[in-house]
Structures are given as C-alpha cells and as structure tokens.
Amino acid sequence: MKGAPLAERIRAEVADDVRELGEVGLATLQVGEDEASTVYLRLKHQAAAEVEIVSVDRKLPHAITENELLGLVADLNADEAIDGILVQLPLPEHIDEARVIAAVEPVKDVDGFHPFNAGQLYLGRPAHVPATPLGVMALLAEYRVQIDGSRAVVVGRSDIVGKPVAHLLLQANATVTICHSHTDDLERHTLDADVLVVAAGVPEVVTADMVKGGSAVVDVGINRVAGGLVGDVDPGAAERAAFLTPVPGGVGPMTIAMLLRNTVTAARYRRGLLAFPGIGR
Ligand code: NAD
C-alpha cells in the first residue's frame, strides 16, 4: 500500500479547497532545536506552501517559559488569519506539554491532540483527528481493505497514533485489540489480525512469521538505524500479507497530506461552512 500517490491526490484536492476558501493560515510553534522536529516542520511548511496555505513558523528559544509559550498560543488563538495551530512535540522538560496542548483553541487544533478533540473521538463524534491515524484509515480505504467485522490489532497505545487509530477502527466496526509494551505473547495477537497496525517505534518488532496470511499490515514505525530508515515490521512480511505499507513511502506521506486536510477543515469550521462537532459551536 503505497502512500505517495494517494497523498498527492489529497494534496491536489486540498489545493483546490484552499483556492475556493481564499486565504487559509497555519501556524507552528517549535521550542528548542530538536533535529527531527526541525526536519518534520520543514516538510510540513513546504507541503503547506505547495497548496498555498499561508504558514507561519515560530521558532522559540529553549529557555522560553511555559507562561510565555502560553501567551503565544493565546495570541494565535485570537489571530483571525490563523485557522490551524500546531505545537511541535516534544517540548522541553520544563514545559508542561499537556497544559500547552490544552491551551490551543479546539477548533484550531489541527493535530487533534486537545482533550476536547480526543474526547470527541472517544465518543464517536470525531472533530479534529490526529493526522497519522487518519492517514492509516485513508490508506486502508484506498486499497478497499475490509474493516467492518474484521479482527484489527493495533500495536502501540500512544495518544498520537495507537489510541486514536484503535478508535477509528472501532468506529469502522472492527473488533479491536490494543497491544503494548506490557502485552504478553504479542505473536498470539498479531497472528489473529486481519488488519494489523504497528506503531511501536521498535525496529522490526513484528517479524514475517507474526503476520496472518492474507492480512493487511500498516507499518507506522519510522526508526533510524545504521543502514537507514526501517519500520516496525519486517518487509519480508509482504510474502504472507495481502497488503503491506513500505517504509519510507507508506504512512509518512499520508500524515502530511492529512495535516493539510485538517487545516482546510479548520478553516471551514471557522467560517461556519461546517459545524464543529461538540458543544456550542
Ligand atoms: P510512542 O513511543 O509514544 O509509543 C509506542 C507504543 O508502542 C507504546 O504504547 C508502547 O507501549 C508500545 N510498544 C513499545 N515497544 C513495544 C513492544 N516491544 N511490543 C508491543 N508494544 C510496544 O511512539 P508513537 O509516537 O506512537 O510512534 C510510534 C512509531 O511510529 C515511531 O517509530 C514513530 O517514529 C512512528 N511515527 C510515524 C509517523 C508517520 O508519519 N509515519 C507519525 C507518528 C509516529
């Protein structure tokens, strides 16, 4: 399941939407100089520029205080030209990540990390949903993988990938099992999976013999090793699975495309063209 062709189509759709909406604005906040974060942000801003989303890249010194950062978030919340706000994680130790995420106006929270948006997803009334899980579901839909009634196993329970993707699979009527670092006998679960989504951040934690024949496997992992980039699934699993996403070129391009789409959705919510699911909006 290649991500790039679908991601390109979605980006073209987003470009049309931006033209229709007029100006759409995205702001990112980065604290400190984490190298991987800088690379991810550069890709996000390049992608935004290509679809003519106006993006603002605020790079802040490591020494910024939590209150100063909260002040900047408040400014962006109040800025009419900004539709989406993205706080690049991780934040330095002296800043309470949860507090900063909770300070972003939910309608502008294009990462879908705010407790309001996480809660809406839990309740089955999704508002803004994190981009990577949306990308996983879009890939499965593109390749017409049967989800309704299937056994889906998610390896990983992070707030960014594992938990939200498990909720989306549940809403699509799969029977969902969530595995994590305390799961005993991982293979017993993965071998049962018609749909297997792996987001553990452990190089090739799922080996070929752990995959059910004829299944669909989505490898979210991106791990830097001596030989380059590897996923969480042994590429040899392609021999048994009906579908497998490559790393790189699978989920990665989808994440950025979905972030752009979320930004356009935020613009629609803010202009009253779409109702923001939840209370009082
Ligand atoms: P995380 O470290 O926050 O969470 C990892 C999860 O995996 C945890 O819930 C942990 O319990 C579980 N886990 C760890 N070791 C395990 C093991 N041996 N067996 C079973 N479960 C285990 O990571 P994350 O943010 O969810 O990211 C996961 C991976 O996905 C990373 O490699 C990350 O780089 C990648 N990622 C890719 C994209 C993308 O766009 N492709 C986006 C986000 C994350």
Image (cartoon, rainbow, N blue to C red):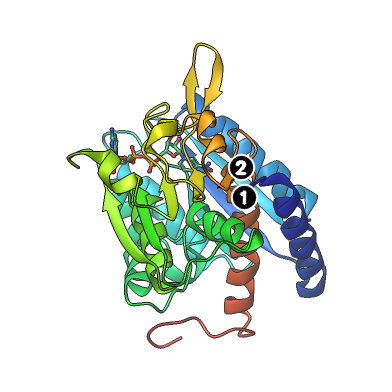
Which numbered marker is on residue 254? 1
> Would you say the residues marked 1 and 2 are in contact, meaning their CB atoms lie under 8 Å apart?
yes
Q: Is residue 185 left or right of residue 208?
A: left
Q: Which three-letter amino acid code belongs to the residue tagged 2?
A: Gly
Mark 1 vs mark 2, foreground winner is 2
Which residue does the numbered mark 2 point to in the structure image?
A: 250
- Taking the image in four quarters, ligand 1 sits in the one at top left
Image-quadrant location for residue 268: bottom right
Mark 1 crowd level (few <14, some 14–19, many ≥20, 10 Å Cα): many
**Going 46% across and 34% down the picture, which residue do you hit?**
233
The residue located at (28%, 53%) in the rendering is 178
Q: Position of residue 52 (x, y in %)?
A: 78, 56
In the image, residue 27 sits, relative to residue 220, either above or below, namely below
Can residue 222 be seen at all in this image of the molecule?
Answer: yes
Q: Residue at image x 47%, y 58%?
A: 130
Q: Is mark 1 within 8 Å of ligand 1?
A: yes
Please tell me whether mark 2 sits on a helix, a strand or a loop: loop
Q: Nearer the viewer, residue 259 or 194?
A: 194
